[in-house]
Image (cartoon, rainbow, N blue to C red):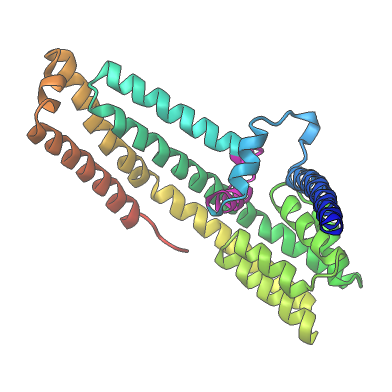
């Protein structure tokens, strides 16, 4: 009995020591893991010019999700100096503000519709910013092609020419080429770096330029003459795109005026007959009519924009 009690006490002490060591190892590892996650989460987006970042915890939590990862890539393609957490917080705040404003100014039925419009507007804003950044980059492509042709004619390698273009050109071309130069510096191939650039800023002009550079880098050849001809072609396409955009400006304005006229008519009706919107949305038939009207205005906006979209 004495030996059994001694053995039991020894086993208990050993299990207790192992449990304490395990808990200590778990806590230490968790702290180190959290510290590493914090460093990696803060590294991709250092605060430029000392600007403070808000909603850091929300940003880390969102970027760990699939939705946050996609949103981060989408924001990065727009060139906006904002984190995922800040953007989501602004969208939620704007949606809540519009919800309350529409409910108080019009009718409680319009609160959810205003919130949906706020979320859709945030998505449309990112799309517009991305398209505008792509347009600015396309307008810089002739200059980029000219710089690369001059650098190649002077005997510089393509990697060096891309780095030189990143230093000389303004944003967004300078920023995007700096990313390409950084990837080339850490061992990525020219095909991979330029391919990622074409994925971030998709356009026909950039695809042609990337294809020319990749093929010349693989097989050699008269890259200087190819870039010279490409520069002239890009200049012509730039002028053509500008003329097409000018011709379609009236149609674009019409696409935005049509839904605004519908909203203005609704507000005018409530101004002439106060309480009419409350009475109209107080019945399910009126609610269906309002939703159908907004849906038709949205469909008209989409069709007008679709018909006025011409790929050059």
Q: Quadrant of the N terminus?
A: bottom right
Q: Which segment is the magenta one?
A: 67-84
Up/down of 167 relative to 46, above or below: below
Report if residue 65 is visible in the image: yes
Q: Nearer the viewer, residue 210 or 296?
A: 296
Q: Nearer the viewer, residue 41 or 45?
A: 41
Q: How far from the left and from the top, in percent, is residue 90?
A: 53, 31
Q: How far from the left and from the top, in percent, is residue 242?
A: 51, 52
Report if residue 230 is visible in the image: no
- The verdict on residue 128 being magenta is no
Instruction: Please give left or right for residue 219 compared with residue 232 in the image.
Output: right
- The verdict on residue 74 being magenta is yes
Instruction: Please give left or right for residue 275 compared with residue 211 in the image.
Output: left
Q: Residue at x 18, y 14 (%)?
A: 271
Q: Nearer the viewer, residue 187 or 60?
A: 60
Up/down of 96 relative to 185, above or below: above
Q: Residue at x 83, y 66 (%)?
A: 184
Q: Main secondary structure of the magenta part?
A: helix
Which of the 4 image quadrants contains residue 199? bottom right
């Amino acid at each position: 009995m004495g030996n059994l009690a001694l053995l039991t006490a020894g086993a208990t002490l050993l299990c207790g020591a192992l449990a304490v060591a395990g808990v200590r190892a778990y806590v230490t590892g968790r702290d180190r893991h959290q510290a590493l996650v914090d460093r990696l989460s803060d590294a991709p987006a250092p605060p430029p010019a000392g600007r403070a970042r808000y909603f850091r915890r929300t940003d880390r939590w969102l970027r760990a999700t699939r939705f946050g990862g996609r949103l981060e890539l989408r924001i990065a393609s727009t060139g906006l100096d904002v984190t995922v957490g800040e953007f989501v917080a602004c969208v939620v705040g704007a949606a809540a503000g519009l919800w309350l404003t529409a409910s108080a100014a019009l009718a409680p039925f319009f609160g959810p519709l205003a919130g949906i419009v706020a979320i859709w507007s945030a998505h449309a804003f990112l799309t517009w910013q991305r398209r505008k950044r792509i347009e600015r980059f396309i307008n810089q492509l002739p200059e980029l092609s000219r710089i690369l042709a001059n650098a190649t004619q002077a005997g510089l390698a393509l990697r060096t020419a891309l780095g030189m273009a990143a230093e000389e050109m303004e944003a967004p071309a300078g920023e995007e080429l700096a990313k390409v130069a950084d990837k080339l510096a850490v061992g990525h191939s020219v095909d991979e770096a330029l391919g990622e650039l074409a994925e971030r800023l998709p356009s026909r002009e950039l695809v042609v330029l990337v294809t020319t550079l990749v093929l010349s880098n693989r097989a050699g050849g008269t890259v200087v003459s190819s870039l010279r001809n490409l520069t002239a072609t890009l200049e012509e396409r730039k002028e053509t795109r500008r003329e097409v955009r000018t011709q379609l400006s009236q149609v674009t304005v019409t696409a935005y005026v049509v839904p605004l006229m519908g909203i203005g008519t609704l507000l005018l009706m409530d101004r002439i007959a106060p309480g009419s919107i409350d009475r109209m949305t107080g019945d399910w038939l009126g609610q269906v009519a309002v939703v159908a009207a907004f849906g038709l205005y949205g469909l008209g906006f989409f069709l007008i924009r679709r018909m006025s979209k011409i790929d050059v």
